[in-house]
Amino acid sequence: MVAGQERGPTLAWLFFGWSGRLSRAPFALGWAFWLMLLSAALTRIVAVPKEDPAFLFWAFAFFIVAIVSTVSSIMLTIKRLHDMNLPLPLIVCLFIPAISFFALFVFLVWPGTPGPNDYGRLPDRPKD
C-alpha cells in the first residue's frame, strides 16, 4: 500500500462496522441482501418435508442468518443515523412494531448531511 493512500471501505465495515457514515443506496442494498438470504432459507424450510434431514439443516441456517442479519442491520442503521447526523437512540424505532416500518422508510429516503458532519468527512466511509 502506498503511503498516504486512503483506505477504502470493506465489506466487513459495511455489514459489521459502526463508525462512519452510510448513504441511502448502500443502506438499502445491505438490508436487501439480508432479506434475500432470509427469504432463501425460509423458502428451503417450506419446500423440504419435515421428515427430511435437510429440514433441520435449513432451520438451523435460517436461525443463524437471522441472528447475523439482526446484528448487521443494527450496524447498518447506526451508520445511516450517523450520515443523517441524528442521535443514536433513534435506533430504538426499529424495535417498536407500530413504527418500525415507517422508521425504516424514513431511513431509506431521508438524505444524508451534505459535506462533513460529526461522524466523518464523507458518506460510505469509516470515520477518519
Image (cartoon, rainbow, N blue to C red):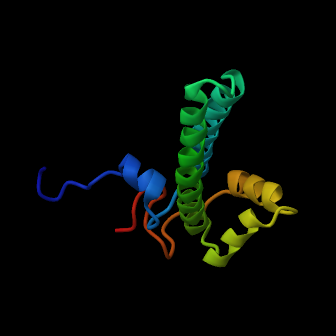
Residue beneath the point at 66% across and 26% down: 51
Residue beneath the point at 48% across and 72% down: 119
Percent position of residue 62, x then y:
59, 41
Percent position of residue 43, x then y:
68, 27
- Front residue of 10 and 8: 10
Q: Is residue 26 visible?
A: no
If the image is split into quadrants, where does the C terminus sit? bottom left
Q: Quadrant of residue 102?
A: bottom right
Percent position of residue 65, x then y:
55, 45
- Front residue of 82 and 67: 67
Residue beneath the point at 72% across and 51% down: 109
Percent position of residue 127, x then y:
39, 67
- Front residue of 24 and 14: 14
Does 51 appear above or below 111? above
Query: Is residue 18 found left or right of 46 in the rendered image?
Result: left
Q: Is residue 98 visible?
A: yes
Residue beneath the point at 79% across and 60% down: 100
Q: Quadrant of residue 52?
A: top right
